Image (tube, rainbow, N blue to C red):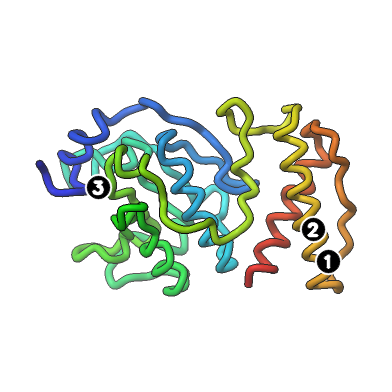
């Protein structure tokens, strides 16, 4: 078998590159990405670690699926499978020496994410022996290895993982999964007020199972507050 992580290995274990088994979903309230469906939980785990460390994943400079060749090479990029994520590329460029605004403790925690069988899930581009690529995190396990599960619990509130009938929730949705998300938002806002009473008071949202504008605003406030609480 080809070297783990190489384009040949990716094709062997994940199949051909291209728009297969992809989903577009909210990595954070203001950042939408497209990835392999099977990889959504582990990318959410990566985002939760960044969330815990107070590192903001910004829109417009973050992305995942991109059907293209490796820069300077002939093989397909891992982005072509939707199995790599570039975060804040304006602050974490592809360059040598390494240039990044990511805290080392945060990167180390992401690199420490393991499957239940102890396999490291992510490789960080900042560790490349050639040109450093600090924005880049790529999945280094097979579909079967990933399906076995990720070790440990999520380190931060999982605001974006509420689902209904295997579809990611979105504005306009209705049902018990939306109500559960609304209760989670209210819980984070209430906890934030207790820990940081000087914060601007944000009213609780109605738990009515209908995702409208108030739920969207509440989710945005809860995401910002949870970042501060986790610092």
Identify the secondary structure beneath mark 2.
helix
Q: Position of residue 132 (x, y in %)?
A: 28, 64
Q: Position of residue 12 (x, y in %)?
A: 18, 34
* Label 1 sits on residue: 193
Q: Is residue 111 left or right of residue 158?
A: left
Q: Quadrant of the C terminus?
A: bottom right
Determine which of the numbered discs, if any, sits on residue 189 in the image.
2
Is disc 2 in contact with disc 1, using a CB cutoff of under 8 Å?
yes
Residue lying at 32% horizontally and 65% vertically, measured from the top left: 126
Image disc number at residue 45: none
Measuring from the top left, give residue 68's x and y in whole percent: 29, 37
- Residue under numbered circle 3: 71
User: Where, by quadrant of the figure, is residue 104 drawn?
Assistant: bottom left
Residue occupying image coordinates x 59% and y 67%: 54
Q: Dot 2: within a 10 Å radius of its alpha carbon, few (fewer than 14), some, or many (20 or more) residues?
A: many
Query: Cβ–Cβ below 8 Å for labels 3 and 1?
Result: no
- Choose between 76 and 71: the one closer to the eye: 76
- Which is more N-terminal, label 1 or label 3? 3
Q: Is residue 165 above or below residue 9?
A: above
Instruction: Provide the secondary structure element on which disc 3 rests.
Output: loop
């Amino acid at each position: 078998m080809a070297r783990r992580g190489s384009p040949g290995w990716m094709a062997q274990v994940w199949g051909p590159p291209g728009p297969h088994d992809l989903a577009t979903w909210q990595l954070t309230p203001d950042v939408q990405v497209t990835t392999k469906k099977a990889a959504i939980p582990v990318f959410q785990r990566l985002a939760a670690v960044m969330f815990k460390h107070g590192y903001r994943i910004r829109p417009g400079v973050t992305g995942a699926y991109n059907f293209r060749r490796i820069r300077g090479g002939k093989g397909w990029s891992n982005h072509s499978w939707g199995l790599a994520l570039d975060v804040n590329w304006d602050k974490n460029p592809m360059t040598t020496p390494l240039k990044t605004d990511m805290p080392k403790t945060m990167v180390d925690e992401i690199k420490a994410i393991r499957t239940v069988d102890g396999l490291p899930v992510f490789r960080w581009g900042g560790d490349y022996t050639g040109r450093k690529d600090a924005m880049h995190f790529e999945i280094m396990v097979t579909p079967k290895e990933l399906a076995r599960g990720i070790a440990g619990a999520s380190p931060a509130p999982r605001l974006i993982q509420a689902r209904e009938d295997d579809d990611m929730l979105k504005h306009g949705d209705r049902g018990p999964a939306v109500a559960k998300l609304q209760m989670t938002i209210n819980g984070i806002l209430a906890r934030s007020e207790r820990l940081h009473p000087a914060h601007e008071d944000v009213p609780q949202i109605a738990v009515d199972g209908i995702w409208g504008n108030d739920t969207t605003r509440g989710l945005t406030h809860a995401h910002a507050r949870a970042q501060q609480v986790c610092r």
